[in-house]
Amino acid sequence: MAQLLQPSFFSCNLTLSSARLKSKRVTKIPRSFCCCVLNEDKLTSVVKNGKDVLDLCKVVNGMWQTSGGWGKIDVDNAVNAMLRYADAGLATFDMADIYGPAEDLYGIFINQVRRERPPELLEKVRGLTKWVPPPVKMTSSYVRESIDVSRRRMDVPCLDMLQFHWWDYSNPGYLDALKHLTDLKEEGKIKTVALTNFDTERLQIILENGIPVVSNQVQHSVVDMRPQQRMAELCQLTGVKLITYGTVMGGLLSEKFLDTNLAIPFAGPPLNTPSLQKYKRMVDAWGGWSQFQVLLQTLKRIASKHGVSIPVVAVRYILDQPAVAGSMVGVRLGLSEHIQDTNAIFSVALDENDINSIQEVSRKGKDLLTVIGDCGDEYRR
């Protein structure tokens, strides 16, 4: 899923050419500021702010897993896997400048689509990337040069979406950066400007400064319901949408971890990836492993009722939340594949009993807004 760590935290396993918010009601921004509409097609949603429009698959292929820690990636196998996802209708890919070779893989992939696939598929492919700069002075030239790097790596004249992250809110340079990104959008180098891991207070400040962001990518799952608190209020007021990551908690929300006891050495599956380790910490903050087992058992009963798996129910529940335009499912390209499970997300419909059961067990955990803070605060603690 979409994670943010300093670039030095990542290791690359292949060689390429480039290798606490206090309560605050939001009342200042008119509802017409931006909007999102759902297509009749169950697969896609459209994020929009004024004349800035982008359609994307509701289930987004997250490429953090290409950055090291999940197994060695073979370039050809990875690109072929991307083609299979796109051919299956799962044609939106999420990456970042700091996700090792992710942008380079996309560049190889999109060129293969141009050569070997019909124009209709090329028109459906979307590449969402992130820019995670150090907190240096955000001059126009610095921003421009940084975005040009992503454009070259992804081999596109215009980025479909640039999602911006900022480490330190005490440094107001994020507004300068976003204004320069807006200029690049007007020049045709970026189609839509968005955010990742911004909290509600800063999102409101950005909108009040007239910066036309269309979405904010945040951590959101049946365990982490923080986005449905303060963030959802602002999103529903303004129309800014949420793209979620951590929705299957790196695989913790799956049958693999059902009825396991991690307190007994070697009794359960190993937490052997960065995402599993990250989201195990979220489980601990929320209520611990025993309470998490109750949640998994509840999700399993619902999944069995619908003839699907636990991850399908977990993603469907978040996609049905207010303001959510898309949810991330991480892809281990060339190592494992879950196209069939992912496509099941679009056909399953949770009923009132399902929703009530999930809400009941989810609310038994701690309020992570109180424990951690607002969306993205885990990166600034």
Image: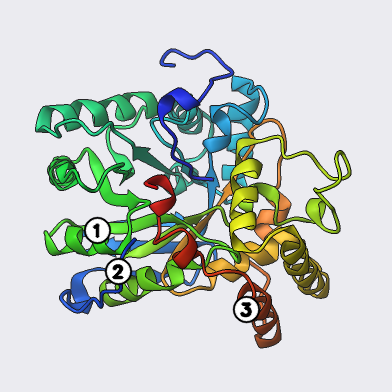
Which quadrant is the N terminus positioned in? Answer: top right
How far across and down, in percent of the image, does residue 153 sit?
37, 24
Quickly name the residue at label 3: 359
Amino acid carrying mark 2 in the image = Lys
In terms of sequence position, does the residue under pointer 3 or pointer 1 come before the other? 1
Label 2 crowd bin: few (<14), some (14–19), many (20+), radius 10 Å: few
- Where's residue 66, x and y in %? 56, 30
Instruction: Specify the amino acid type for callout 3.
Output: Gln
What residue does disc 2 label?
Answer: 22
The front one of 231 and 72 is 231
Mark 1 in CB contact with mark 2 (< 8 angstroms): no
Q: CA distance from mark 3 to mark 2?
A: 25 Å
Query: Quick check: 132 above or below 361?
Result: above
Q: Looking at the rendering, which quadrant does residue 286 occupy?
A: bottom right
Indicate which label's residue lies in the foreground, 1 or 2: 2
Tell me the distance, in whole angstroms, between the alpha carbons under discs 3 and 1. Answer: 28 Å
The residue that appears at 84% across and 45% down in the rendered structure is 268
| Residue at position x 24%, y 58% in the image | 202
Neighbour tally class for label 3: few under 14, some 14-19, many 20 plus, Cα within 10 Å: some
Q: Nearer the viewer, residue 26 or 57?
A: 26
Dot 3: what SS? helix
Q: Is residue 337 left or right of residue 165?
A: right
Residue 261 drawn above or below residue 116: below
Residue identifier under label 1: 202
Give the crowd class for mark 1: few <14, some 14-19, many >=20 residues within 10 Å: some
Front residue of this view, candidates 294 and 196: 294
Amino acid type at circle 1 is: Arg
